């Protein structure tokens, strides 16, 4: 009888513990007020384990998996990027072909933009119109930010049967125009008129323009990765090129060794200093006549993957993907390169989005 009583007591305790676990499966998120940073973690391809981290610079506290912890379901397969407009955050989930929208103050899910092919980035023009670039659709989707419905598209197909041209990636605003880089098997930056939703011009760049920014002097900086050995579209030295945004004229190019693999370029808060990942992290003025010899941050044994710069303090955030399988790290540096903090995030931290600026 005593053994049966003990078994019953243990069983009852297990039921109680399981019921408590069901009611509160994860710890609540401590949402700090003020300026902060979202880190979009890609996760593993085909594992649907993309996640969202949240870092508060003042307290140096990080909260991981905040989307799941608040909403009870995962972001999905390959969380690509994030865009903030008013109180909403648009999280692009590339291989799940959707964009999940959250309230950036509560992290609560408010809706999804679906009907997409392979979305990459979001840019909102005004309260009733936004754009979504796409890797495979050969079209830029137009959507309504109030209804989360796709309302149209801008065809960008160059009618080549050899590649998915034009793939579309990042968007940079220049007056009423948007510059859009075409990265995958391509060498173009397209110019879109946001009033007519038409492609009005283009720039021919080096092979595979992977990232771009527009500086305070009206210059468009385009980072190209040069392709890879055996690439059917070509393989050349990667580089960083500067174009005049008004005339589209090429003004300067810094070439890198053929085997290099540049990934990202960002601007500081005053848009007069560039930071970029090419193995190491580099820093240079937008008026520099020569590329620096000494890195801003040495790579060491780290795998630098993504870059973000605080738009107010100009502090630099760099992610370390480690091996793309385990949770990554983020390093925070002063504008002078002094280490400030290091913290753990999710798998393959690939994008920084700054809140409260």
Image (cartoon, helix red, strand yellow):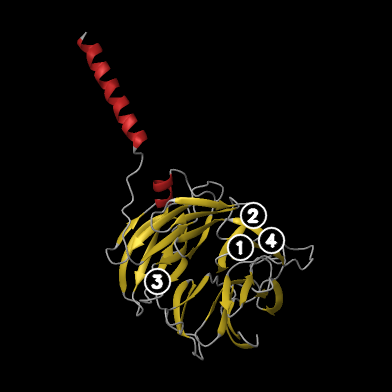
Q: Earlier in the sequence, mark 2 or mark 1?
A: 2
- Residue 39 at what x, y percent from top left? 43, 60
Q: Find numbered disc 3 in the image and state the secondary structure of the residue it sits on.
A: loop
Label 4 crowding class (10 Å Cα cut-off): few <14, some 14-19, many 20+? some
- Using the numbered discs, state the Cα–Cα distance from disc 2 to disc 1 in whole angstroms: 9 Å
Q: Which residue is mark 4?
A: 152
Q: Find numbered disc 2 in the image and state the secondary structure of the residue it sits on.
A: loop
Q: Earlier in the sequence, mark 1 or mark 4?
A: 1
- Residue 186 at what x, y percent from top left? 69, 70
In the rendered image, which quarter is residue 198 located in? bottom right
Q: Earlier in the sequence, mark 4 or mark 2?
A: 2
Mark 1 or 4: in front is 4
Relative to 109, residue 305 above or below: below
Label 1 crowding class (10 Å Cα cut-off): few <14, some 14-19, many 20+? many
- Using the numbered discs, state the Cα–Cα distance from disc 1 to disc 4 in whole angstroms: 11 Å
Task: Kindly indicate whether the residue at mark 1 contacts the one at mark 2 (C-beta within 8 angstroms).
Answer: yes
- Using the numbered discs, state the Cα–Cα distance from disc 3 to disc 2 in whole angstroms: 30 Å
Q: Which residue is mark 3?
A: 357
Mark 3 or 4: in front is 4
Mark 4 or 2: in front is 4
């Amino acid at each position: 009888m005593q053994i049966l009583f003990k078994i019953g007591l243990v069983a009852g305790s297990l039921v109680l513990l399981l019921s408590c676990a069901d009611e509160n499966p994860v710890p609540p998120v401590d949402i700090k007020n003020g300026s902060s940073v979202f880190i979009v973690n890609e996760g593993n391809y085909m594992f649907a384990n993309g996640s969202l981290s949240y870092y508060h610079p003042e307290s140096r506290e990080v909260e991981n998996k905040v989307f799941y912890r608040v909403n009870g379901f995962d972001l999905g397969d390959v969380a690509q990027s994030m865009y903030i407009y008013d109180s909403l955050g648009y999280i692009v989930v590339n291989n799940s072909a959707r964009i999940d929208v959250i309230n950036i103050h509560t992290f609560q899910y408010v809706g999804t933009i679906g009907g997409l092919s392979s979305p990459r980035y979001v840019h909102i023009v005004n309260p009733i119109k936004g754009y979504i670039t796409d890797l495979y659709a050969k079209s830029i989707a137009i959507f309504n930010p109030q209804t989360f419905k796709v309302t149209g598209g801008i065809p960008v197909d160059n009618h080549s049967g050899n590649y998915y041209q034009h793939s579309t990636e990042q968007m940079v605003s220049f007056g009423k125009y948007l510059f859009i880089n075409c990265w995958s098997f391509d060498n173009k930056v397209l110019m879109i008129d946001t009033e007519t939703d038409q492609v009005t011009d283009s720039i021919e760049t080096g092979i595979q323009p992977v990232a771009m920014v527009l500086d305070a002097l009206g210059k468009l900086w385009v980072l190209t990765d040069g392709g890879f050995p055996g690439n059917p579209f070509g393989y050349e030295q990667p580089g960083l090129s500067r174009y005049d945004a008004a005339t589209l004229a090429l003004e300067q190019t810094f070439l890198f060794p053929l085997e290099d693999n540049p990934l990202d370029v960002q601007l500081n808060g005053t848009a007069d200093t560039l930071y970029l990942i090419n193995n190491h992290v580099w820093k240079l003025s937008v008026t520099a006549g020569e590329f620096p010899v000494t890195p801003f941050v040495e790579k060491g044994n780290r795998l630098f993957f993504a870059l973000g710069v605080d738009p107010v303090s100009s502090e630099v955030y760099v992610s370390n993907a480690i091996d793309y399988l385990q949770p990554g790290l983020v390093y925070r540096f002063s504008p002078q390169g002094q280490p400030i903090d290091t913290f753990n995030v999710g798998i393959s931290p690939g994008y920084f989005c700054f809140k409260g600026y």
